[in-house]
């Protein structure tokens, strides 16, 4: 149980294009999903908290117009990197909380490696 | 605000031996959870163990156990009978109950020597 998928696992795009990353909870419902960014050999940096049916909450310093988050259903959240630039190249990880669980555990997706040329 | 500190960037241990990874945290909250996550080379984050702060008993999951010292705000992870598959980055994390989001430490890279 508690499986989270991400798609795509890798993406290479040209500078200026937009990239959409999907995060799905496969066997549970997630009212809350989280988007992290991880640079090489560093820890996870929380970018935003995605709440089903409402606007995402962004961490300080994260541009909401740059990183668009949509959480349209209890099993799907999407992160769109708009007008991507080389500095947006990174490893993006999502996680999800089981709506029925009181234990605050986040289950993570396998991550998406983004390379912007 | 919460902070989590892992003071050991790297650790190594011989296969079948025991190793302890350190973690300290700072929080003003009374109700919170603590976690250890493992990130192997595949980069998939895997939950290793979870501890509720209101529980005095240390959590245990097979070869993994924690030493939770609430007053000292310390949450170390002990791995017994280390196996080659335990090689990974280990992240300690803290989350206030109800706040949803987690704060992660810097990570400790664990190497298992055969």
Image (cartoon, coloured by chain):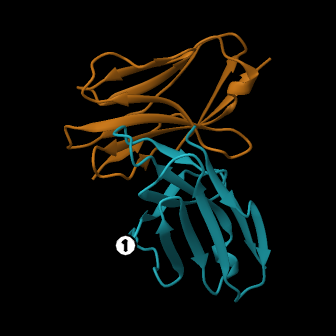
Q: Is residue A38 visible?
A: no
Chain letter of mark 1 equals: A
Chain with colour orange in the figure = B
Q: Residue at x 56, y 14 (%)?
A: B62
Quadrant in the picture for residue A14 = bottom right
Vertical arrangement, residue A91 with respect to residue A13, above or below: above
Q: Is residue A47 above or below residue B113?
A: below
**Quarter of the image containing the C terminus of chain A?**
bottom right
Residue B103 screen position, x and y as percent: 40, 49
Left or right: B24 with respect to B72? Answer: right
Task: For mark 1, give the secondary structure.
Answer: loop
Front one among B106 and B91: B91
- Using a 10 Å C-alpha cutoff, classify the residue at mark 1 as few (fewer than 14 neighbours), some (14 to 19) or many (20 or more): few
Q: Residue at x 43, y 30 (%)?
A: B50
Where is residue B24? Give x, y as percent: 37, 34
Residue B64 seen in the current view? yes
The image quarter containing residue B108 is top right
Q: Give the total number of marks visible in the rendering.
A: 1
Residue toward you, A108 or A114: A108
Q: Which chain is cyan?
A: A
**In x, y percent, where is residue A41?**
64, 50
State left or right for residue A40 relative to residue B113: left
Give B61 or A77, whichever is nearer the viewer: A77
Question: What residue is drawn where x is 67% and y is 50%?
Answer: A110
Q: Quadrant of the N terminus of chain A?
A: top right
The answer to which quarter of the image holds residue B23 is top left
Relative to B19, say whether B92 is above or below: below
Horizontally, residue A59 falls left or right of residue B107, namely left
- Residue A106 position (above or below residue A6): above
Residue at figure coordinates x 44%, y 35% from the top left = B35
Tag 1 residue: A54
């Amino acid at each position: 149980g508690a499986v989270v998928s991400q798609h795509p696992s890798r993406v290479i795009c040209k500078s200026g294009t937009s990239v959409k990353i999907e995060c799905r909870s496969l066997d549970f419902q997630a009212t809350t999903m989280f988007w992290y960014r991880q640079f090489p050999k560093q820890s996870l940096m929380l970018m935003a908290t995605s709440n089903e049916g409402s606007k995402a909450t962004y961490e300080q310093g994260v541009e909401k117009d740059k990183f668009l988050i949509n959480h349209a259903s209890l099993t799907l959240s999407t992160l769109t990197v708009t007008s991507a630039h080389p500095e947006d190249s990174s490893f993006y990880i999502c996680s999800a909380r089981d709506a029925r669980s009181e234990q605050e555990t986040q289950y993570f997706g396998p991550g998406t490696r983004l390379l912007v040329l | 605000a919460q902070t989590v500190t892992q003071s050991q960037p790297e650790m190594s241990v011989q296969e079948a031996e025991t190793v302890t990874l350190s973690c300290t945290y700072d929080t003003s909250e009374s109700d919170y959870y603590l976690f250890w996550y493992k990130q192997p080379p595949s980069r998939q984050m895997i939950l290793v163990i979870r501890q509720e702060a209101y529980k005095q008993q240390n959590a245990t999951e097979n070869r993994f156990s924690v030493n939770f010292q609430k007053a000292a705000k310390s949450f170390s992870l002990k791995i017994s009978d280390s196996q080659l598959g335990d090689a990974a980055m280990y992240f300690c994390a803290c989350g206030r109950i109800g706040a949803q989001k987690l704060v992660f430490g810097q990570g400790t890279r664990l190497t298992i020597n055969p």
